[in-house]
Amino acid sequence: MILRTADIERRDGRVVNRHYDDIYSSSDADAEVERVFLAPAGVEARMRQQDRFTIAELGFGSGRNFLAAAALAKKCGARLHFVSVEAQPIAADALLDVLQPTADHHLATELAAHYPPALAGWHQRVFDEGRIVLSLFLGDAAEFAADLRDRHRSGVDAWFLDGFAPDRNPDMWAEPLLADVAATTRNRGTVTTFTSAGRVRRALEAGGFSMRRVDQRPHKRESLAGVMADGLWPTQPPRQVHIVGAGIAGCAAARHFADAGVDVLLSDQAEGPALAASSVVAMQHARLLGDASAQADWRAAAYLYATHWNAHRPAVRRTGALQRPGPNLSPEKLFGIGQAFAGSGSWVSLGEDGDEPALWFPDAGVVDLPALCDDLIRHDRIETRFGVPSCQTDLPTIFACGAGTTALPQFSALPIRPLWGQIDIVERQPNNAEIPYARIGDGYIAPFQGGCVVGSTYEYEPWAEEIATARNLEKLHGEAVTWRSRRRGARAVASDRTPVVGPMEGVWVSSAHGSMGATSAYLSAAVLLHQIMGWIPPVTRRIQTLLDPGRFARRRRSRAR
């Protein structure tokens, strides 16, 4: 679902939301964050005592609270997970202007550059090499709080309640919502809020907070702060994990855990990373659906996360991609997809290519998977063991073995099979300029290393390499090229063409990414990281259910009734 963006204007130097007729912050915005939210909760001292700190917020607004908390976390050497909700997000192209002036211009610029489009659901953004994580839910605050209550097992260290004033936005301050705030708070966790409304104070006290008034003169009379007397006592997350499989799914998972401060043992029976399906060059692009299904939500979310997470990695070349109709995508369906996402942001736009509709993805690009996998596992916290059989450990274990997943006893019932594919790399004639962007339709053609990469085949049984090359070169429609090389691999594909991500039989799995591994592996890695660490997964419940390995058993039981 596409959300309505905030209707904003400036009045006397302050940014106002016209719908609520209320300001986002005072004229001394950064100082206000300190005196209302950070200082009364003693956040700085607590961050210095904790390696990880979780802040949850009602009302993301311009993101100024996030920026201030992130700056403080960096100062204290703490890792920050900032979880927030916004029903009317500020348009991404207006965010940086709204934030001016701000103390941390660099992070503000990063936030604006990677701010999610106005699509309902969870969006995650990662900064400072994984030390600062923003999990932003776009949608209803009550749904956000209930989701946090049910799926965030590690508790919240500090709550910031920063919705518009209770008399102008009463739903944000409803008693059931504030009860969920209390239910998710850690023992001795805090809550701070700009409002001093009696009904808010009483609702928080009913949830177990010991509340006090904070003098805010001369800016306003007072605000509220509280401490949770008897909150959650979360279990400790693991300090090390074992990941089996060093393709893109395993390497992406390894980097996510390492960036989160968790040691990783990465093993593979091959002699190095990316020697199976991940040995190819692939497109990082979105195969969108316009039907508002969980699958449609997943594809959009995975693509948006991938383009953010890989934005600065040298093995991912942002070329842009033009998607035209193809064998499985009629012009009418492609036009409908464009209409479904129209107005959500500049990440996708509907246009024309010749006499047919086309979708333009400015952030899509070409991924050299072997180079990317090699880059991802170069981290001090990742220990690699190659050329050895899968070793048993007592660590939490993630199996990311691609098409070999079903060879393991606990996964033998999963309907996953190999699907072979090949790409070919060619040089264009000297008088032909390099193609400026990728073209997607019947396969894809994309710029690569001064020439172009053409792919990819779908071989339910392996073809002869020359036959696969001939099929790929047909996509060039007779253009004279010099063939350079080919790469082949067997993708793992589930019967429902959806990745298998989550817990199963006491271990974890990330498999069946098919031809979308260059796009889907990263958000899948984030889902596993959050599940294992006890954090709210960065996807909606229905996406988590869509990916869940137990879905096949549930379907079998349902058919047997």
Image (cartoon, rainbow, N blue to C red):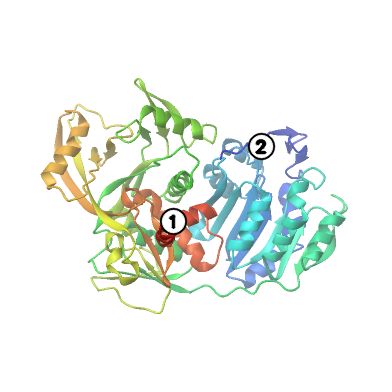
For the residues labelled 2 and 1, the Cα–Cα distance comes to 32 Å
Q: Quadrant of residue 289?
A: top left
Which residue matches tag 1?
A: 547
Residue farthest along the front direction in this orientation: 561
Label 2 residue SS: loop
Q: Which dot, 2 or 1, sits closer to the camera?
A: 1
Quarter of the image where the C terminus is located? bottom left
Q: Quadrant of residue 500?
A: bottom left
Q: Nearer the viewer, residue 241 or 182?
A: 182
Residue type marked 1: Leu
Quarter of the image where the N terminus is located? top right
State the image coordinates of residue 412 (x, y, percent, origin top left): 31, 66
State the image coordinates of residue 537 (x, y, percent, origin top left): 53, 59
Label 1 residue SS: helix
**Whether residue 22 is situated above or below residue 415 in the rendered picture:** above
Q: Count residues near mark 1 (Cα–Cα under 10 Å), then give few for <14, some for 14-19, many for 20+.
A: many
State the image coordinates of residue 165 (x, y, percent, origin top left): 79, 46
Residue that appears at 55% across and 58% down: 132
Q: Count residues near mark 2 (Cα–Cα under 10 Å), then give few for <14, some for 14-19, many for 20+.
A: some
- Decide if residue 515 is on the left or right side of residue 303: left
**Whether residue 121 is situated above or below residue 556 in the rendered picture:** above
Residue that appears at 58% across and 62% down: 151
Can residue 120 be spotted in the picture?
yes
**Disc ID at residue 6:** 2
Q: Are marks 2 and 1 in contact (CB under 8 Å)?
A: no
Residue type marked 2: Ala
